[in-house]
Image (cartoon, coloured by chain):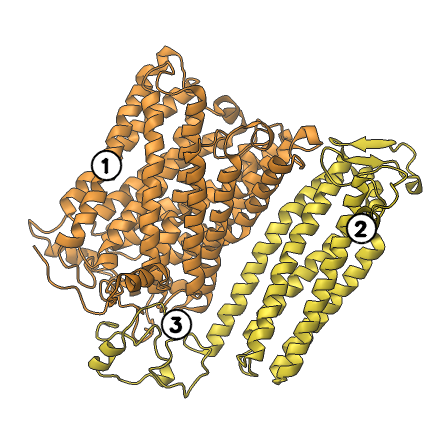
């Protein structure tokens, strides 16, 4: 086993002699890389908790009768699943873990612009998480993750306030991260790192941060108003008080639709990096991919009404929102086509991150195209609140965001830890996840189209085959998620030493040692080339040099 | 292009480029401590810059640019936060214009006007504090910041009086003083604090002929006062934060942190104060002057 010592003076090294000093060096750290690791651990814990709730849901749905959970308990289970996965895993996931780790490294900076704010954002995240977990322990919430009024503000008799407080606090954690990214990308770029030399991950992180900064405060004030209405019985959403529940939905989706792009945009950035690195080519149409991220960020603010086609909003508003929703397909398709063009004549190696990237492309296309179905008012009315919708957003959120997150974790794992993971197990689990994912969610398109409503725990017997298929797939998916946790953890002790640049990739982060030194760059680098400056003939040379036994 | 392999920067900060000295490995090891110390300045020269330059920045100009941009981006989030309330306001005012026109009569416009003046003057004193800081007049900076704080407290005091007026009406007294001192009961019962007891009396002064004689909870009248209380108290919370910041700025100025070359804290603190001021400039006409 390779147990050679990692390069000295890396950020993981502790000179702490006492336990107290060790705690201080981690829990009061202002190093963006250590904060990224704090986030990595805590976010994965929340992911497992959300997965646990999903397990309960899938087990209940094996039979048409409600035999495991009562209707009320089932409501609490899917609400817990939604709230944890959305607010505490998907939204902070890629930005707070990979973004925190990579943004300063990729642009040639020593740290984020506001290191202490960065640490504070992690504490806010944990505080928000604790509120949400406390709510779950004391009985949970049954409003669904959308907190629709007046149910949430007046009639629900579960822990709405605690959960809302959790989401509210977590929002400020997001905002802190977003402000930090924007300022860091604007002011901390190394000399020569012009906007059009930035890695595409930075572009997508920038677009994500713009959404975070513009949208999150709105849901903050909205949740605050719901809380006030619930605590003091005065407010503006409950019709009994003269208010309009539709206003809540507008304000909520004004955040929560862009929030969907907060979840997927960083994933796009990760995929751009992976595709380029494992095709050994510069990304095709760099500027188009960069601007398509910005276009998605902008359009994301104009389409919230497609969540409200059946809520009683004006038909004309529905038509406009429908049209704008279909516009989102353009920048999304630009990305997919450009990645495909990057693959063309590339020297593709099927390493684990690349498997995730390719899986992402296929699954995101399905998720995206069904999004266009749902954007059409007539079809949406037919499938509103059915499993078709559930399948659609899981294709985007799990098949898209989580695939990209896992691909990114594998790709940068050698940089984060200095060690390689097991490529064999990596490949196996990527395939297991792909198979399990499709088996879980594809049947849901069918069952949804046939009329199975979401959020019901009792259903007609003719749907049982599809539900059982879905639950079986979820088991496979769960196994696929657990395997990486095991081999990635083991790699910390048994993994081969990675070296500075195990993938032979471009990018400033691969030029520092693995793990990077505490301050990233002893001397601020001077950038003279574009991103993805692979030699024009890199692909041909790779192909010529390939021998049996080389990595695929 | 293999950088960053051979050495570990001392303490928590990288030396400023101008101050970068080649240090022997032994020295580096000896000075490597935790990464958390916010002021690990002891081990390198400060010939080229003042103590305020954080070590992940290359130049004071870069640090200033980052701080200023950071504050502006934060102000954008504040605008969006209040934006949610303004949105709700717009929706309901568009739905119930006559209710808004009538309800606005029941706010204390003279006090609101005085408060507007108070806040505008406080913005002036903050702006003067920034230019005094630039000129290096330390005492003047502290004086101006303290004046700002006094004005801010005065604003909050007047606001609190306005609130207590509304609450004393709900309790049945015409003024807060009578409520506390046990004076006479109000002749006409009205309660403009949203809640179970909310009761909006018809007002003769408005000239609206079809106004209801009384309107309780569940009527649009409550929406106006709810938005008024939420918006102004959210604003008041921001005032409290602003007062804390002003106090902190006065303190660090007194400690000598602020110099003619480094007064970014005063500048960005001032930006925050101006934002609070601007929010009020919108709140005042939207609530007090729409009749």
Q: Which quarter shows the N terminus of chain A?
A: bottom left
- For disc 2, the neighbor class at 10 Å (few under 14, some 14 to 19, many from 20) is many
User: A122 and A210: which one is in front?
Assistant: A122
Return the x and y of residue B72 as percentages of the image width and height.
Answer: 57, 63
Return the x and y of residue A173 as percentages of the image width and height.
Answer: 46, 52
Q: Colour of chain B?
A: yellow
Disc 2: which residue: B288
Q: Are marks 1 and 2 in contact (CB under 8 Å)?
A: no
Q: Colour of chain A?
A: orange
Residue A333 shows in the view = no
Disc 3: which residue: B56
Disc 1: which residue: A480
Q: Secondary structure at mark 1?
A: helix
What is the chain identity of the residue bearing mark 1? A
User: Is residue A104 left or right of A153 when viewed as pictured?
Assistant: left
**3 or 2: tag closer to the N-terminus:** 3
Can you say whether A471 is above or below B8 in the image?
above
Can you say whether B152 is above or below A293 in the image?
below
User: B125 and A523: which one is in front?
Assistant: B125
User: A384 and A23: which one is in front?
Assistant: A23
User: Is residue A136 left or right of B199 when viewed as pictured?
Assistant: left
Please tell me in which quadrant of the rendered image residue A264 appears: top left
User: A412 and A52: which one is in front?
Assistant: A52
Return the x and y of residue A314 as percentages of the image width and height.
Answer: 65, 30
Q: Are marks 3 and 1 in contact (CB under 8 Å)?
A: no
């Amino acid at each position: 086993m390779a147990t050679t010592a990692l390069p000295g003076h890396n950020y993981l090294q502790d000179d702490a002699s006492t336990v107290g000093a060790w705690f201080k060096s981690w829990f009061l750290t202002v190093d963006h890389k250590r904060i990224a690791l704090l986030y990595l651990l805590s976010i994965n814990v929340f992911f497992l908790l959300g997965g646990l709730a999903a397990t309960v849901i899938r087990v209940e749905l094996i039979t048409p009768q409600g035999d495991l959970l009562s209707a009320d308990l089932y409501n609490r289970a899917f609400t817990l699943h939604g709230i944890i996965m959305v607010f505490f895993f998907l939204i902070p996931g890629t930005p707070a873990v990979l973004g925190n780790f990579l943004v300063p490294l990729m642009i040639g900076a020593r740290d984020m612009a506001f290191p202490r704010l960065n640490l504070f954002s992690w504490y806010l995240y944990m505080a928000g998480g604790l509120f949400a977990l406390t709510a779950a322990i004391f009985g949970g919430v049954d409003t669904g993750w959308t907190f629709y009024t007046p149910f949430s503000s007046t009639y629900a008799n579960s822990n709405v306030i605690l959960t809302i407080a959790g989401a509210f606090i977590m929002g400020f954690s997001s905002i802190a991260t977003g402000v930090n990214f924007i300022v860091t990308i604007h002011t901390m770029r190394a000399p020569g790192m012009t906007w059009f030399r930035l890695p595409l991950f930075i572009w997508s992180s920038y677009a994500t941060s713009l959404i975070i900064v513009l949208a999150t405060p709105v849901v903050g004030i909205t949740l605050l108003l719901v809380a006030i209405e619930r605590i003091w019985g005065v407010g503006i959403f409950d019709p009994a008080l003269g208010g309009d529940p539709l206003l809540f939905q507008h304000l909520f989706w004004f955040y929560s639709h862009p929030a969907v792009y907060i979840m997927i945009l960083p994933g796009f950035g990760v995929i751009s990096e992976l595709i380029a690195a494992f095709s050994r080519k510069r990304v095709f149409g760099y500027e188009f991919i960069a601007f398509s991220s910005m276009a998605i960020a902008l359009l994301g603010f104009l389409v919230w009404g497609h969540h409200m086609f059946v809520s009683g909003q004006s038909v004309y508003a529905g038509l406009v929102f429908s049209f704008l929703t279909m516009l989102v397909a353009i920048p999304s398709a630009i990305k997919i086509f450009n990645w495909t063009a990057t693959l063309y004549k590339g020297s593709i190696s099927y390493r684990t991150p690349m498997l995730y990237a390719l899986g992402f492309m296929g699954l995101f296309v399905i998720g995206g195209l069904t999004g266009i179905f749902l954007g059409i008012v007539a079809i949406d009315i037919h499938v509103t609140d059915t499993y078709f919708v559930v399948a659609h957003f899981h294709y985007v959120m799990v098949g898209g965001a989580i695939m990209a997150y896992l691909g990114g974790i594998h790709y940068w794992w050698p940089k984060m830890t200095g060690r390689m993971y097991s490529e064999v197990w990596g490949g196996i689990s990527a395939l297991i996840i792909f198979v399990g994912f499709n088996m879980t969610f594809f049947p849901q398109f069918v069952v949804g189209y046939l009329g199975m409503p979401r959020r019901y725990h009792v259903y007609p017997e003719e749907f049982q085959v599809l539900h059982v298929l879905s639950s079986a797939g979820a088991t496979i998916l769960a196994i696929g998620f657990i395997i990486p946790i095991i081999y990635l953890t083991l790699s910390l002790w048994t993994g081969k030493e990675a070296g500075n640049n195990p993938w032979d990739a471009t990018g400033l982060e691969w030029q520092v040692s693995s793990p990077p030194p505490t301050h990233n760059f002893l001397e601020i680098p001077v950038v003279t080339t574009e991103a993805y400056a692979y030699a024009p003939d890199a692909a041909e040379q790779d192909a010529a040099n390939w021998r049996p036994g080389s990595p695929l | 292009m293999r950088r960053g392999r051979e050495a570990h920067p001392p303490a928590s900060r990288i030396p400023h480029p101008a101050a970068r000295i080649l240090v022997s490995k032994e020295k580096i090891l000896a000075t490597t401590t935790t990464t958390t110390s916010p002021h690990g300045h002891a081990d390198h020269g400060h010939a080229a810059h003042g103590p305020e330059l954080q070590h992940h920045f290359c130049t004071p100009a870069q640090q200033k640019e980052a701080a200023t941009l950071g504050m502006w981006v934060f102000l954008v989030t504040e605008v969006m936060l209040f934006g949610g309330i303004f949105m709700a306001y717009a929706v309901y005012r568009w739905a119930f214009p006559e209710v808004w026109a009538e309800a606005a009569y029941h706010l204390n416009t003279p006090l609101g006007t005085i408060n507007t003046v108070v806040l505008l003057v406080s913005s002036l004193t903050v702006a003067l504090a920034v230019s005094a800081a630039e000129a290096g007049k330390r005492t003047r900076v502290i004086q101006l910041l303290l004046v700002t704080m006094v004005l801010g407290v005065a604003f909050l005091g007047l606001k609190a009086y306005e609130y207590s007026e509304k609450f004393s009406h709900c309790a049945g007294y015409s003024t807060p003083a009578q409520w506390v001192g046990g004076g006479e009961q109000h002749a006409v019962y009205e309660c403009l604090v949203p809640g179970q007891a909310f009761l909006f009396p018809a007002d003769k002064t408005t000239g609206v002929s079809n106004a209801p004689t009384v309107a309780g909870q569940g009527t649009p009248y409550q929406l106006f006062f709810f938005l008024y209380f939420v918006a102004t108290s959210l604003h008041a919370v921001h005032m409290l934060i602003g007062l804390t910041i002003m106090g902190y700025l006065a303190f660090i100025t007194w400690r000598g942190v602020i110099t003619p070359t480094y007064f970014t804290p005063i500048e960005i603190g001032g930006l925050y104060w101006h934002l609070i001021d601007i929010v009020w400039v919108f709140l005042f006409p939207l609530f007090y002057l729409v009749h």
